Image: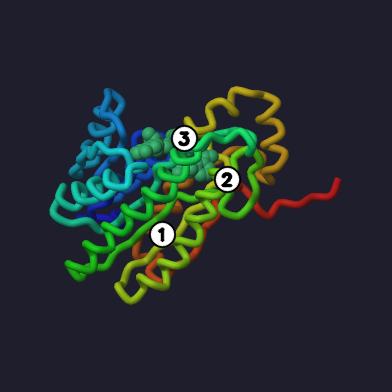
Amino acid sequence: MERFKDKNILVTGSTSGIGQACAERFAKEGANIILNGRHFADDEKQLIKTIEAYGNKVKFVQGDVSKGMDSVGILQQAIDAFGSLDILVNNAGVERNANFWEVTEEDYDLVMHTNLKGVFFGTQTFVKYCRKENRPGVVINMSSVHEEIIFPHFSAYCASKGGLKMLMRNLATELAPLNIRINNVAPGAIATPINQKMMADKDKMKGLLENIPMKRMGTPEEVAGLVAFLASDDASYVTGSTYFIDGGLTYHYEEQ
Ligand SMILES: NC(=O)c1ccc[n+]([C@@H]2O[C@H](COP(=O)([O-])OP(=O)(O)OC[C@H]3O[C@@H](n4cnc5c(N)ncnc54)[C@H](O)[C@@H]3O)[C@@H](O)[C@H]2O)c1
């Protein structure tokens, strides 16, 4: 299946986890890929080789999405990389664990600027480009089940993903006349580096799995499959929605 043949796709934060899986999935389906990360190291060289092996073009754009002007620059470089840009996946994200009363301004800014401000100005740059060139576009935001359900001790993270929900809904209406679709993907617990600490803690894992009807974590590849659907023409009438991918976690209720 080559749903993305000749499409150029930027995935932010694509050097690990879900972002990397999305980049590989799009490449498998024929796309040229613009990777993004804050640093370029050996792992990124390997990823470039993997994507090239699918026979597609790939470029790495270094930049930190938490800095408003960097996210504008990342988008501009992504547009220039292969002469056009069709799909933007706002995937880069961070979380910080602290009691609400102990959250520092530094950590608040890091989380909000990475998860929300970067998406805001990166998407704005993409939309300006689509308008100027009179091109359609697709935007997918990597949100979280925590755009909807609580996550005690992760208050800035919840605020950022909750903000991302309303940003997406607002933009769906504002951008539909421009032929730009925008949706959120809301993963539950996915086995990626962001969860490394929890995955190493047997008790925490037991508590987590008890809350998931499917009794397992998801894989980055499963999330990438949903992202690919939303990015493709198979989802041509889908905009303004959040798609949960959580093994049943969000609307879970059982009586003992
Ligand atoms: N893994 C999960 O359980 C889970 C659940 C819900 C939502 N998510 C979301 O999925 C997204 C991807 O997370 P992941 O689980 O793959 O974790 P991850 O830590 O493997 O990936 C995050 C990626 O974002 C990059 N990144 C972080 N800050 C950046 C910045 N300022 N500029 C550029 N890149 C930056 C990291 O280098 C990394 O490649 C995040 O938005 C996260 O909130 C993950």
Question: Which mark, by number, is residue 106?
Answer: 3
Residue 74: name its quadrant. top left
Please name the amino acid that badge 1 sits on.
Leu
Is residue 36 something that shows in the picture?
Answer: yes
Could you say whether the residue bearing mark 3 is in a helix, strand or loop? helix
Please name the amino acid that badge 3 sits on.
Glu
Q: Residue at x 20, y 40 (%)?
A: 59
Q: Is residue 148 left or right of residue 107?
A: right
Measuring from the top left, give residue 244's x and y in whole percent: 55, 54
Could you say whether the residue bearing mark 1 is in a helix, strand or loop? helix
Measuring from the top left, give residue 75's x and y in whole percent: 24, 50
Up/down of 19 relative to 237, above or below: above
Residue position for label 2: 188
Q: Is residue 247 left or right of residue 61?
A: right
Mark 2 touching mark 3, by CB under 8 A? no
Could you say whether the residue bearing mark 2 is in a helix, strand or loop? loop
